[in-house]
Amino acid sequence: MNQVFVLANQHQQYFGKSKEWLDGSDSRSLYRSEYKDEAINLMVELTVKDPDVRIQIKSLETAANGALVLPTDDTSSATAEPNTNLDDADAGEADFQAEPKSQPITDVG
């Protein structure tokens, strides 16, 4: 089995070779890359064209016949690129308490 990278959107659809979002029922028609950097480049191109799409790169295995082994649910062994930079205490909250810069107003005239 080989590892390949595919693109999935927020609707659990996969990007296809035909440049459309597909449900994944025919895994042979899905875009795949052996190289993660190629998948990242395509992800950037797609998000520039459609800023509303949320794309994840998933690492999947291929079966002996070349078909992709797709996950059956979100708790699969396929790895997405999660954002793990948030602390549990601050999850989703930003702390912006910068001091405002003030300058004296001078009357010109």
Image (cartoon, rainbow, N blue to C red):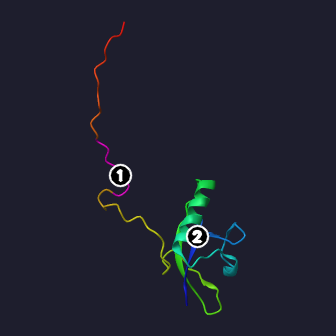
Along the line of sight, the residue nearer the viewer: 34 or 74: 34
Q: Farthest residue in the top direction?
A: 109
Percent position of residue 8, x then y: 58, 69
Closer to the observer: label 2 or label 1? 2
Percent position of residue 50, x then y: 62, 55
**3 relative to 65 in the view: left or right:** left
Could you say which quadrant of the image residue 87 lies in?
Answer: bottom left
Task: For the C terminus, give its image quadrant.
Answer: top left
Compared to 23, does 92 lie above or below?
above
Along the line of sight, the residue nearer the viewer: 59 or 77: 59
Q: Name the residue under label 1.
A: 93
What secondary structure prevails in the magenta region?
A: loop
**40 relative to 91 in the view: left or right:** right
Check disc 1 and give the amino acid type: Glu
If you read the primary sequence from the N terminus, does the residue marked by circle 2 or circle 1 appear first? 2
Compared to 100, does 53 lie above or below?
below
Q: Mark 2 points at which residue?
A: 7
For the record, the magenta segment spans 91-97
| Mark 2: secondary structure | strand
Q: Residues within 10 Å of mark 2 (few under 14, many from 20)?
A: many
Could you say which quadrant of the image residue 11 lies in?
Answer: bottom right
Q: Distance between the residues labelled 2 and 1?
A: 28 Å
